[in-house]
Amino acid sequence: MSASEKPYQATHEIGRVYDAITDSKVLVNFFLTTALQFIPAAQSYLFLAAKNKTLLLEVSVPLTVEVPSDLAAEAQKIFEDGKLRVGKGRMFLPLIARNSVMGVACLERTAEAPGFTSQEAEIGFDLASEFSGALKNILLFEENMKMERLAAVGQAMGMVVHEIRNIMQLARFSDEMTRIGLKEKNEKFLTTGLSKMTKTLKEMDGFIGEMLSLTKDYQLEPENVDLSAILEELQSDLAEQAHRYRIKLDFKTDPGFPVVEGDGRSLYRALLNLVKNALEAFQDNKDACIKIRARIKDDEHYELIVEDNASGMSEEVRAKLFEAFFSTKGKRGTGLGLMVVARTAKMHQGSVKVESQLGVGTKFILTLPCIFRE
Ligand SMILES: Nc1ncnc2c1ncn2[C@@H]1O[C@H](COP(=O)(O)OP(=O)(O)OP(=O)(O)O)[C@@H](O)[C@H]1O
Ligand SMILES: [Mg+2]
């Protein structure tokens, strides 16, 4: 390699380092630092264009508060014509990526220092091109992330509103029943109204619990759990719905199943989600049945098995099951139910497995530790 090739090889190598940086602020600082190593100067500035095409100072090395006004005006001109300019004591490098100028870098020497050489100008230009490509990629990535986040927030909000509306409907119904009961002094209406109100509160509580369980800082509340009591509660909560669709619920713990440690409410909600999915997977099946079994697996683990003889799932559905917002139910499903199940299992240091055959049925197996470990 000849001596004159060396700096170009080096700028290319540095370009690879630029590409490996994922934070725009780190990259911008690193670019000015490396530029100053190749092209010594007293001061450097980096301007990036705002949406309205005016240049704003992003960073300066060494850090300065004031940008000379003639320098700022000249940088704006370079931004507009997109051409490198080497003047007396100042080098302006347009930052060009994908055919558009995104900003300008400027290196400034003191009046006593020698002027910039043409080789320095070439190195500056090469470094600026490597930097601009890397920065554009980061900015596009950050923009995409923002859009994706915004879309996810919108989707989550839609789901929350949808769920709250359902619960409100139940609340309105119980309110109406209670009013009629009071007006007509009808005890049956009053009892139904109040029991629906209890159900509404339970649904609201469960919904809040589920939303919380999906947040980052959620912590389980371990306690002694009586699974047979939880299964009884679940069976009674779903009895009406199951009866309406002629689906048998058969929930049991194995004889001698011990008290285990865990978060009872989380386990209830995980099982509720699994049974609701099963209920929703039946299409007029004969002998429709949903079974839950709680049984000891080995010295340290127990299993909760939720099994149905409903529609089963295709390979494609099974592959996406635990993805957020994946649902085959259109507006009727939010696609978060199984995420809640997976999260519950993970937070208990357990696991979920699924076996399913299209047209035959589905089995979810939660394997959980009998003793809770943080
Ligand atoms: N027991 C089952 N039988 C057949 N398909 C199932 C079963 N359980 C889950 N699925 C499939 O997995 C998908 C995802 O389930 P998940 O519970 O995460 O969301 P969802 O039920 O669609 O909506 P929701 O958030 O209201 O629970 C369902 O849409 C369904 O296609
Ligand atoms: Mg579901």
Image (spheres, helix red, strand yellow):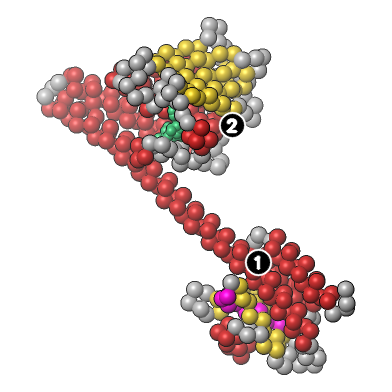
Say whether residue 106 is magenta: yes
The circle on residue 346 is: 2
Classify 10 Å Cα crowding around label 1: few (below 14), some (14-19), many (20 and above): many
Name the quadrant containing residue 62: bottom right
In this rendering, the answer to whether 197 lies above or below 37 is: above
The front one of 28 and 338 is 338
Name the quadrant containing residue 233: top left
Tell me the magenta residue range: 99-107
Q: Are marks 1 and 2 in contact (CB under 8 Å)?
A: no
Q: Give the mark nearer the N terminus: 1 vs 2.
A: 1
In the picture, measured across the screen, residue 38 lies left or right of residue 275, that is: right
Say which residue appears at 36% left-offset and 14% top-offset: 287
In the picture, measured across the screen, residue 110 lies left or right of residue 6, that is: left
Say whether residue 364 is magenta: no
The image quadrant in which ligand 1 is located: top left
**What's the residue type where badge 2 is placed?**
Lys
Q: Residue most toward the left?
A: 184
Say which residue appears at 67% left-offset and 88% top-offset: 85
In the picture, measured across the screen, residue 291 lies left or right of residue 236, that is: right
Q: Quadrant of the C terminus?
A: top right
Q: Is residue 342 visible?
A: yes
Say which residue appears at 68% left-offset and 66% top-offset: 27
- Residue 13, given in percent of the width and then of the height, sits at 78, 67
Per the image, the residue denoted by label 1 is 134
